[in-house]
Image (tube, helix red, strand yellow):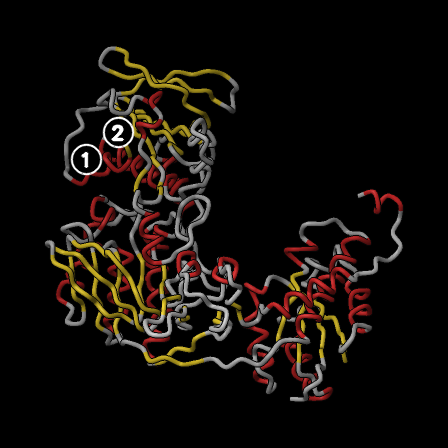
């Protein structure tokens, strides 16, 4: 690599995602005239094989030593382009990306100003790229075992896959029994198979597996260490146990919405009103419902509800779809029709979401069996003699209706567990706006988290049915196996570092670090960084009053070069209306 920067700039059309609002050819021409830029190109999809080949060939032909890719968010394809330039012989950290999709083309209309913003972002990235320095990743050894937090079907399936691959697994379950909510189900949809067979088969395999250690009635109280070398502290019977692990899978499950929060539906007031889970247990216990003449099911109780959460200053938390409720109701309605063929069965719904394999056919069969679906919003449930009355607006007919019922079943939604915030802090997890744990990337890293070595499975990440829960559990186990099988893991080099001459050892940086990566050296009295824990977020650098902390890939000189490039920007002549905007 030569000392002087030789930059290659690559502008992505991203199909029409960028090209529809940004003049990529104008941006390419502008980039070609920037200092230290040797070549600038544009291509329909830079992340495609031909796009990657362009970069590799230019590195070899033009002796490039810095690369700038202007495309989508680095969160999506930075690993892709780092791998590309590494294959071409460059250090993978000699790359910078300009986000001209999410931060430009997607948030502005087509026009001169949008194209100019893309030019500014590219110029800023080029300025930073000229100051990038090669960094070296480190490797750490791995403890060849895993901890799975949660003993529902997701946790059990993840543990079994890891154990079958030969790794020791510890399941930490807060309840006395395995199985979670699935153990309470009567039958599954769309096949109407007994849920107990599925759950008990998993429980039998888990409890008899030689590589699985089950810790029931236990809870995780502390997690220390880093990917490959975690130490999980578990409390059980007032006794504390340290469990070493190379990977952790969080499968803590969900809670159902509390219908007491919608008092107009009479839950807890009228014995005729129950939830779908309670109704499931009626069938599971083979309890007798005495010849009901009419049963009403109400969909979306606590889901897709803009009113839940209002009035207390908090954001609305239940605007999402819980995904399983439509099919649970269809299943239970069909079971009612089978057991009580003369009963009237009515379902009030917003719309039916039968998204899975065989779901639409299952829903159609429910209607063929005589289940009446009425599109409407129930407003209240009242008592009338020994029965209850559901008042609702039929939104298709545009009129108010009343339906008498012997039993009303509320399809309550799925919500995060009450201790989700505590679990998130324990494992350094992010949460989305609805309160569920957030994956690292919804498409490219759907079971990973921002904390390396920690993975997600099941409904703790989002509402899902049994099939999707098991699929994600197996995916999480597969992702966890990758470092466990390698025996080593690479640690990202873009971490923070300390200038000990400036460090006063005050510890303010450690107080804001979400990853527990900073500690005070007992002898030197200076802060130190555990590079294996550090995620390079930069919070410590902002908190340091002495300015003693910097972050590789975002040093003071690199950031100021970007600021200078933007400050020195000479805008082109713009139309009057554009200037006004």
Distance in Å between CA atoms under marks 1 and 2: 10 Å
- Please report contact status of discs 1 and 2: CB closer than 8 Å, yes or no: yes
Q: Is residue 412 left or right of residue 563?
A: left
Residues packed near mark 1 inside 10 Å, few (<14), some (14 to 19) or many (20 plus): some
- Is residue 315 shown to the viewer in this render? yes
Provide the secondary structure element on which disc 1 rests. helix
Residue nearer the viewer, 423 or 324:
423
Residues packed near mark 2 inside 10 Å, few (<14), some (14 to 19) or many (20 plus): many
Quarter occupied by residue 485: bottom left
Q: Where 497 sits versus 183, above or below?
A: below
Q: Which mark is residue 45?
A: none
User: In the image, residue 41 lies at what x, y percent?
Assistant: 75, 74
In the picture, which quadrant includes the N terminus?
A: bottom right
Q: Residue at x 49, y 75 (%)?
A: 493
User: In the image, residue 458 lies at what x, y percent?
Assistant: 34, 54
User: In the image, residue 409 lies at what x, y percent?
Assistant: 30, 29
Query: Tag 2 or tag 1, which sits nearer the N-term?
Result: 2
According to the picture, the residue beneath numbered tag 2 turns out to be 274
According to the picture, the residue beneath numbered tag 1 turns out to be 282
């Amino acid at each position: 690599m030569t000392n002087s920067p030789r930059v290659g700039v690559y502008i992505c059309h991203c199909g029409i995602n960028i090209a529809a609002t940004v003049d990529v050819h104008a941006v390419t021409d502008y980039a070609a005239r920037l200092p230290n830029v040797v070549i600038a190109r544009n291509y329909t999809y830079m992340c495609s094989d031909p796009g990657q080949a362009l970069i590799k060939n230019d590195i070899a032909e033009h002796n490039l030593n810095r690369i700038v890719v202007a495309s989508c968010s680095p969160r999506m394809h930075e690993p892709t382009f780092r791998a590309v330039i590494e294959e071409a012989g460059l250090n993978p950290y000699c790359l910078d990306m300009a986000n001209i999709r999410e931060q430009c083309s997607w948030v502005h209309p087509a026009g001169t100003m949008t194209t100019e913003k893309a030019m500014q972002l590219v110029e800023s990235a080029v300025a930073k790229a000229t100051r990038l320095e090669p960094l070296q990743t480190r490797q750490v050894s791995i403890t060849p075992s895993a901890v799975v937090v949660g003993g529902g079907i997701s946790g059990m399936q993840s543990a079994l896959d890891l154990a079958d691959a030969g790794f020791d697994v510890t399941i930490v379950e807060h309840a006395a029994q395995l199985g979670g909510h699935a153990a309470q189900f009567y039958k599954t949809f769309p096949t109407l198979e007994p849920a107990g067979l599925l759950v008990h088969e998993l429980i039998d395999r888990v409890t008899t597996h030689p590589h699985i250690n089950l810790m029931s009635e236990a809870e995780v109280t502390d997690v220390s260490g880093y990917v490959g070398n975690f130490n999980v502290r578990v409390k059980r019977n007032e006794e504390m146990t340290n469990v070493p692990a190379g990977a952790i899978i969080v499968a803590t499950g969900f809670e159902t919405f509390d219908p007491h929060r919608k008092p107009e539906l009479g839950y807890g007031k009228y014995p005729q009103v129950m939830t779908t889970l309670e109704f499931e247990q009626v069938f599971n216990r083979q309890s007798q419902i005495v010849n009901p003449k009419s049963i009403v099911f109400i969909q979306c109780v606590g889901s897709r509800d803009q009113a839940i959460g209002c009035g207390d200053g908090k954001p609305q938390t239940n605007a999402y779809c819980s995904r399983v409720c439509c099919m649970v109701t269809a299943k239970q309605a069909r079971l009612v029709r089978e057991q009580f063929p003369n009963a009237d069965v009515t379902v009030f719904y917003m719309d039916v979401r039968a998204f899975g394999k065989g779901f639409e056919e299952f829903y159609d069969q429910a209607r063929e069996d005589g289940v009446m679906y009425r599109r409407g919003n129930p407003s209240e449930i009242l008592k009338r003699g020994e029965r209850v009355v559901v008042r609702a607006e039929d939104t298709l007919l545009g009129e108010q209706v009343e339906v008498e019922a012997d039993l009303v079943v509320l399809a309550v939604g799925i919500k995060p567990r009450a201790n989700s915030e505590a679990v998130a802090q324990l494992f350094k997890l992010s949460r989305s706006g609805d309160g569920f744990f957030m994956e690292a990337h919804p498409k490219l890293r759907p079971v990973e988290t921002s904390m390396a070595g920690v993975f997600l499975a099941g409904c703790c990440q989002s509402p899902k049915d049994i099939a999707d829960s098991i699929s994600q559990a197996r995916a999480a186990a597969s992702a966890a196996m990758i470092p466990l099988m390698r025996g080593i893991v690479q640690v990202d080099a873009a971490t923070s570092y300390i200038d000990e001459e400036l460090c006063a050892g005050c510890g303010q940086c450690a107080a804001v670090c979400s990853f527990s990566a900073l500690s005070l050296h007992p002898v030197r009295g200076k802060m130190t960084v555990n590079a294996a824990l550090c995620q390079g977020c930069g919070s410590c650098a902002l908190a340091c009053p002495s300015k003693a902390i910097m972050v590789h890939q975002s040093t003071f000189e690199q950031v100021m070069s970007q600021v200078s490039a933007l400050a020195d920007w000479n805008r082109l002549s713009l139309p009057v209306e554009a200037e006004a905007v």
